[in-house]
Image (tube, grey):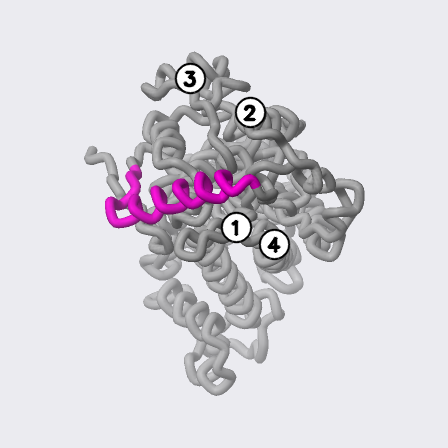
Amino acid sequence: MTTPAHLITPGQLDKAMLLDAAAGGARFTIAPSARAGIEASVQAVATLMSRHEPVYGINTGFGKLAQTRIPDDQLAQLQKNLVLSHSAGIGAPMAAPVVRLMLLLKAASLAHGVSGVRPQVIDALLALLAADVLPVVPEKGSVGASGDLAPLAHLSGVLIGIGEAFVDGKRVPALQALARAGIEPLVLGPKEGLALLNGTQASTALALVAVQRLERIFDAAIGIGAMTVDAAKGADTPFDDRIHKVRGQPGQRKVAASFRSWLAGSALRQSHLDCDKVQDPYCLRCQPQVMGACLDQMQHAWNVLLTEANGVSDNPLVFADTLEALSGGNFHAEPVAFAADNLALAIAEIGALSERRTAMLMDPGISGLPAFLVENGGLNSGFMIAQVTAAALASENKSLAHPASVDSLPTSANQEDHVSMATYAARRLHQMLDNTAGIVAIEWLASAQALDFHRPLRSSPALECLHARLRERVPFLKEDRLMAPDIEAAVDMLEHAGSMSA
């Protein structure tokens, strides 16, 4: 298998590059065209230092201590101390795909040549990524301004031989990890510690991995939702393009087209064309409207996050052409926080709608199927408690969907008095995705069971393939058995078994 190789040209990361980085095994190098700008920014820092004037982050303290002037002979220690003091995170280590993206995003930001960081520092970040030497980064400790300080300190500490990293899945000391990557510990120059720590790369990486996962779960929810339509003998009229064209919402129209593809050619559909049912429940009929709105939010989040991945969130920024170091607030992760909060709404709604479809299949008065989708009910409880589990997960997501971005708690002795909470906003998406994957997996089990009750009638070719995929690992529920292994198998296939597009 060929190892993907990419050149990093500032501002030109794309979705495929981000997917490759998160998956691991890809190699990234700085484009030659970017190196002149990087060198110019380093020279600009040297020139500013030679003037012996205070420049924030280069020869001053940080945050509330910005007025403290640091002597020239202590500037290297200043940058090292910054990394040491800010490595204050707690909690479980961030997942490998997140840390891989953090390494890439930090390198890509520094490659813009406005951070005053030497090329060898950027190359060292990419060497860790290429060797899959992943710093141990605790998941908690950032408020999303001034950047993701604690997570990025843990990430950067490995470069100077501090902390730990994962090598082949095992935690090892930083010096041992650096040897695996073929690099020596760095001595940070002026501005380099601050440039490594300032930025939104942790929150952005968390959100990017979340939206990548969400795309897979979303596609599965569309296919499984279509299976439930057919299993419940629902109408396909609500997916007619004429309905969605006159409203004009782009996601809604795309989702309706997906449902038409999934349902095309169903003999089961043909069997009830002349029934007297007028309208289906909203959980079937309004799927394009709800899922389409989720799709639009996902696309918006992708756009915001891709912009953030391609931008510079350091402070101060060094402009070599005018020999200025400008202090601003690009480290404030409000765009990421808003994108993550909107993704949380989509994740919660995908799960909420799926749970309602599962509940509908349980009810013989609506579905026309055996109660709780099992023969000999009473002796057997069937899917009764699986639906309760789905309800519990959907309810939990409602609490987790509360916007994180509306919260703020001042830090750094009130110097940093408004923060984004973007890192938590993005981190909580993964718990929500776990929940929604479980909800949709339960619906998959239920809708496949429901289809089996309609035999010998067959669904569409696409839905029969989706049914057969599940049946490779989960048999028909003839009588009560342990449900947890079935749910676990369905979740695993949903998350890892490739595309679920019609």
User: Count the marks: how many?
Assistant: 4
Is 98 in front, or is 392? 98
According to the picture, the residue beneath numbered tag 4 turns out to be: 329
Mark 3 element type: helix
According to the picture, the residue beneath numbered tag 3 turns out to be: 177
Mark 1 Cα within 10 Å, few/some/many (few <14, many 20+)? many
Q: Quadrant of the N terminus?
A: top left
Asked whether, in this view, residue 337 is left or right of residue 193, the answer is: right
Q: Which circle, 2 or 3, is nearer the viewer?
A: 2
According to the picture, the residue beneath numbered tag 1 turns out to be: 325
Is 319 in front, or is 304? 319
Asked whether, in this view, residue 363 is left or right of residue 188, the answer is: right
Identify the amino acid type marked 1.
Ala
Q: Which circle, 3 or 4, is nearer the viewer?
A: 4
Q: Label 2, label 3: how many angstroms apart (C-alpha)?
A: 30 Å
Picture quadrant where residue 120 is located: top left
Is 245 in front, or is 158? 158
